[in-house]
Image: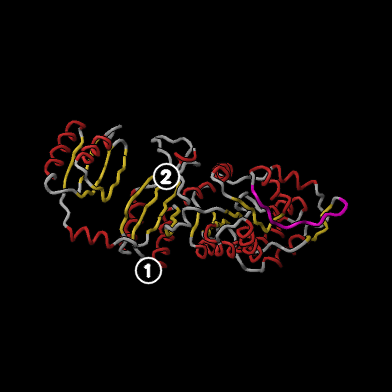
Amino acid sequence: MINITGYDRPGVTSALSEILAKYDAQILDIGQSDIHHNLSLGLLIKTDSTVSGDIMKDLLFKGYELNVRVRFQPVETEEYGQWVSQQGKNRWIITILGRKLTARHIASVSKVIADQNMNIDGIQRLTGRMPLDDPDKQTRKSCVEFSVRGNPSDHALMQKQFMQIASKEEVDISLQEDTMYRRCRRLVCFDMDSTLIGTEVIDELAERAGVGEQVRAITESAMRGEIDFCESFTQRVGLLKGLDESVMRDIAENLPITEGVDRMMTVLKRAGYKTAILSGGFTYFGNYLKQKFGFDYVYANDLEIVDGRLTGRYVGEIVDGRRKAELLKLIAQVENINIKQTIAVGDGANDLPMLATAGLGIAFHAKPKVKATAGQSLSTIGLDGLLYFLGFKDSFIS
């Protein structure tokens, strides 16, 4: 085992590996990282014992020349065999995300990992370098990703502890098994109201119709899961009777877009993802967002309009929680995408069926009941936080 540490510069790895090549050494394992120009390079090699002394001598001389420290450690055959036998253990990705990260966050998460008898193989920063004096604290982001080897002794407890830390420390923590599906997601389905936009459109319409307080009360009850969505939807739409349709355009042009939507959609489209809006809101506003950001699909509810005014009725089947899950599966089938390669993002109780159906379900700035049921949540930053859950680094997407 060879460990090289010191100031990093171009050519260090090349020079040292050329020495190993001269002696025809076999590379059994290799890993390298760079933190603030400080190199840490590890190589596990197999070589003929007759040349091992020459390798050590040449590496030490070259290390002195390059101003790096070289250390050696012999590895017994039995020890190597034990290392090989650990092959095949599951790997997990743990993502910690927030406006800022502290040592307390890392300590809390790493303790949970240790208590589960799992080992951290690697840690990397996904967000850009953080300036010491950041004037825009409301939009800054800090994210690190842990690669962890092993199987949790109690997966449910581990997830619960991460949620408790996230709630207490105001960070987001994602736990995902590092499978082939996690690395090649292809479809992302979003709720619209209070997810892509920072309002409930039906509440905006209700304000214009003079029934805002009544509709908000019904909306909040439905979001908490206290009444059936279809029943609440029918009641709320009925209260909009007589509203002029021109109001809809004015509301659409002034929708409060959620932080990070533009950046997220730019990256997802560039990376070839299919995107869909599956909303219990209204098609008119979903189509507006489709045109603005380039979503591939929109499924929502159609308001009935006669002589330029809302009738208080809707047309077609209500897009409720059950229908959202069905539509997610339908789009995946049409696009020939495995359901495990899908992602669903939403904030309300009526989003839970699609969050449970998708390969990765994310509760976004959601109510406690939705967070607890979904398992994965994003609450501290905007929707572009989704990109870090997928493993994107700022250096790739800026």
The verdict on residue 10 being magenta is no
Q: Which residues are magenta?
A: 295-307
Is residue 304 shown above or below 271?
A: below
Mark 2 and mark 1 lie on one chain; the one further toward the N terminus is: 2
Residue drawn at x 67%, y 60% is: 219
Report which quarter residue 134 is drawn in: top left
Image side of residue 326 versus residue 13, left or right: right
Which residue bears the numbered disc 1?
154
The disc labelled 1 sits on which kind of residue? Asp
The disc labelled 2 sits on which kind of residue? Leu
Residues under numbered marks 2 and 1 in contact, where contact means CB atoms less than 8 Å apart = no
Residue drawn at x 47%, y 56% is: 182
Is residue 74 shown above or below 118?
A: above
Q: CA distance from mark 2 to mark 1?
A: 28 Å
Which residue bears the numbered disc 2?
126
Most foreground residue, 40 or 132 = 40
Most foreground residue, 222 or 21 = 21
> What SS does tag 2 mark?
loop
> What SS does tag 1 mark?
loop
By secondary structure, the bulk of the magenta-drawn segment is best described as strand
Q: What number is the disc on residue 392?
A: none
Is residue 230 shown above or below 94?
A: below
Image position, residue 388 (x, y; %): 47, 48
Residue drawn at x 20%, y 49% is: 1
Image side of residue 63 versus residue 347, left or right: left
